[in-house]
Image: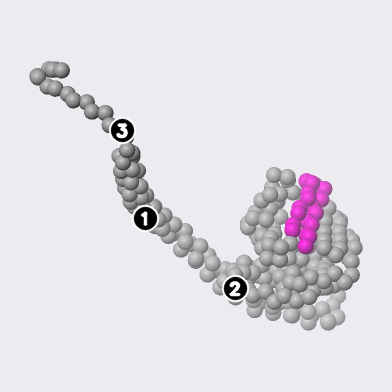
Amino acid sequence: EYYYLGAKYVVIEVKDNGIWKQDVYKNLVIYGGVFLFMMLAMGYFLMHLILKPMKEAISLLDRFIKDTTHELNTPVGTILSNIALSENTHLDEKLKKRLARIKIAARTISNLHQDLIFLTLEKKIISKNESIDLSALILERLEYVSLFLKSKKIQTKTNLQEQVFIEADRNKMVKLIDNLISNAIKYNKINGSLEVILSAHHLSIKNSGRGIAKEKLSQIFNRYERADKSVGGFGIGLSIVSKIAEEYHFEIKIDSEVNKYTEVQLSW
């Protein structure tokens, strides 16, 4: 039929064979893939450029920590060895108290030094597993922190099953137990209590201290996370505990109530 300007139209209906769809999808995949690749490449370049100052700062901090821990090793060892020598001499009560305070401070620095070494060399430390008597090890570590316990007048109760052995690296188990006990002392109150219970597959350390708010319990094992920022510390102790527990497939649970108690339970 004629239309304007004498134009004619012929309409032909054919069965759709779907080839046009294939061409469309093919073009979408090809051009979309090229576009996505270009965006990813550009994003990677920009991300690398933006994060470069942060990486340099982290690298600088890492080198600083390594250098610091290396330099701390000698003076801390010298202080502790000289304290040990001085304890064997006759001293009056005032000097003994002063020496005890110096020993507490030196051991605090020593523990922090060991924590920093663990954090910086964690991936390079090869575990030397051996059969460890946990009850003997716990008594040894309680004796190690006896001055801390006396300084806060904390009463210690122990219920340790004998002949509880575990296959693990001794240094890492020492680090795990030390951090749990030192936290239980650090976040305890004056004239508080510390209870340590050991059974065949379970270790419980409970204090009568400040407690942890429920909303913070899920984050307490994150590095630099502290439940109470009014108490000294860097928030790395429980992070180390978590890493060691993960290596040996220990299960950790924390139960706490503010201003009443905190209990850390370790199961294997």
Tell me the element at label 2. Answer: helix
Q: CA distance from mark 2 to mark 3?
A: 69 Å
At label 2, which amino acid type do we have?
Lys
Q: Mark 2 or 3 closer to N-term?
A: 3
Magenta stretch: give its range: 251-268
Asked which secondary structure carries label 3, the reply is loop
In the rendered image, which quarter contains the C terminus?
bottom right
How far, Cα to Cα, is label 1 from label 2?
Answer: 33 Å
Q: Which mark is residue 261?
A: none
Where on the picture, by quarter, is residue 151?
A: bottom right
Residue 251 makes an appearance in the image = yes
Tell me what residue is drawn at x 13 percent, y 17 percent.
Answer: 2
Q: Disc 1 vs disc 2: Cβ atoms closer than 8 Å?
A: no
Residue marked by disc 2: 124
Query: In the image, what residue type sits under mark 3?
Result: Lys
Q: Is residue 63 left or right of residue 104?
A: left
Q: Earlier in the sequence, mark 1 or mark 3?
A: 3
Q: Which residue is mark 1?
A: 41
Query: Which residue sits at x=31%, y=33%?
Result: 15
Left/right of residue 15 with respect to residue 169 in the rendered view:
left
Q: Is residue 116 magenta?
A: no
